Every structure is written in structure tokens, then in C-alpha cells.
Amino acid sequence: MPTERKPAAGGPSGGDKARKQCELLLRASGMLRRRVAFGRTKLFLDGPVYEELLLARRALHSGYATSLQRCGRGMLSRGRVRRERARRAEEERRRLRVRVRVSRNPSPSPNPNQERRRLAEEAALRRRIAAEEARLREEARVRKAAEDAAAEARLEEEDPYPLPLPPQPLAPYP
């Protein structure tokens, strides 16, 4: 019982179409004259022909590669900058916490004058911080009051029920 021949890939006569397209492509690239053989479902290329096709493919893709690399490097750089900013912000918060922190159980200092000076500096720093926070709260309160007054003035200027103006008589033509 003889085996039945299967049509080439791509359905009936689909393989012929693909083969013709492949031949046109190879002819246009000048590689058809080299060692190329068409089978029923495969294309057989000699080593140098294959290498030349790979070089052509790489040349076509090099433009895409540079733009993809540019995008990738930009994403990585933005991530690094974001992490560095977060690290610096955390470092600043820690530094401020250490400056403000008052130890509940300070280690005994060999020099009582140094301890008194340190406590006085901490108290002065706490007072400055409290004064700055109070100043900022007062500024925010004044700004909010000014915004509210401006909004209220705008509402008073606008008449919620404007009356239509009477029609003006047209002046005679000179």
C-alpha cells in the first residue's frame, strides 16, 4: 500500500506560494545562485549562505536593538534615581530623628558640664522645632482664611439670580 503524498505546509498549493515567496526573497538578495536547495517542506542552505542570512538579519534588527536598549537603560536609570532619592530621604529622616531624640536613659557622662550642655542643646532644639511647627501652622491658618475670604467675596459679587437687562434702544445711524 503506497503512502499518500501530503501537500506541502500551508494547505493545498500553500507550499507553492511560500516556495515562490522564498525564491523571490533569495533572488532579490542575490543568494539564489549559491548553494540553496528546496525540498518539499524545507529549505536547505549551505553554511556560508546561512551565515550571510544571519548577518543580514542582525543588520536589520540592530536599529531595533539600539532603541530597545535606550528604553531599557532609561527605565533602569529612572529606577536607580528613584531608589537613591528614597535612600536620601530616609537618611535625612534618620538624621533628624537622631538630632531630636532625647535618650530616656542617658549614659552617665564623665563630665557633668557636658551633660548639662547636651541637655540644654536638646531643649533648645526642641523649642526651635516647636516654634517652627507653630509658625507653619499659623501660616496655613492665615492662608486658609484668606482663601475663604476671597471665595466668599467672589460669591457676594456674583448675583445668584441676575435680572435680565432691559433692551437698549438702537442709536440712529448718523
Image: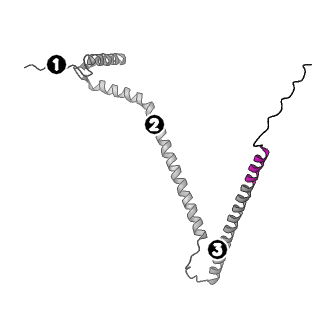
Residue at point 60% right, 69% down? 99
Indicate the amino acid at tag 2.
Answer: Leu
Which corner quadrant of the image does residue 170 belong to? top right
Among numbered discs 3 and 1, the one appearing first in the sequence: 1
Using the image, tell me which numbered label, if any, was put on residue 122: 3
- On whether residue 99 falls in the magenta region, the answer is no
Nearer the camera: disc 2 or disc 1 = 1
The answer for how far apart the CA atoms under marks 2 and 3 are is 54 Å
Which corner quadrant of the image does residue 33 belong to? top left
Work out which quarter of the rendered image holds the C terminus and state it: top right
Q: Is residue 101 above or below residue 18?
A: below
Q: Position of residue 114 (x, y in %)?
A: 63, 80
Nearer to the camera, 93 or 155? 155
Describe residue 79's horizontal placement relative to residue 162 as left or right.
left
Work out which quarter of the rendered image holds the N terminus and state it: top left
The answer for how far apart the CA atoms under marks 3 and 1 are is 95 Å
Mark 2 and mark 1 in contact? Answer it, CB < 8 Å.
no
Residue of label 2:
68
**SS category of the residue bearing label 2:** helix
Indicate the amino acid at tag 3.
Answer: Glu
Residue range of the region highlighted in magenta in the rendering = 146-166
Mark 2 and mark 3 in contact? Answer it, CB < 8 Å.
no
**SS category of the residue bearing label 3:** helix
Residue at point 58% right, 83% down? 110
Structure colour scheme: one colour
Report the label total. 3
Residue at the left extreme of this rendering = 1
Residue of label 1:
5
Indicate the amino acid at tag 1.
Answer: Arg
Describe residue 37's horizontal placement relative to residue 65 as left or right.
left
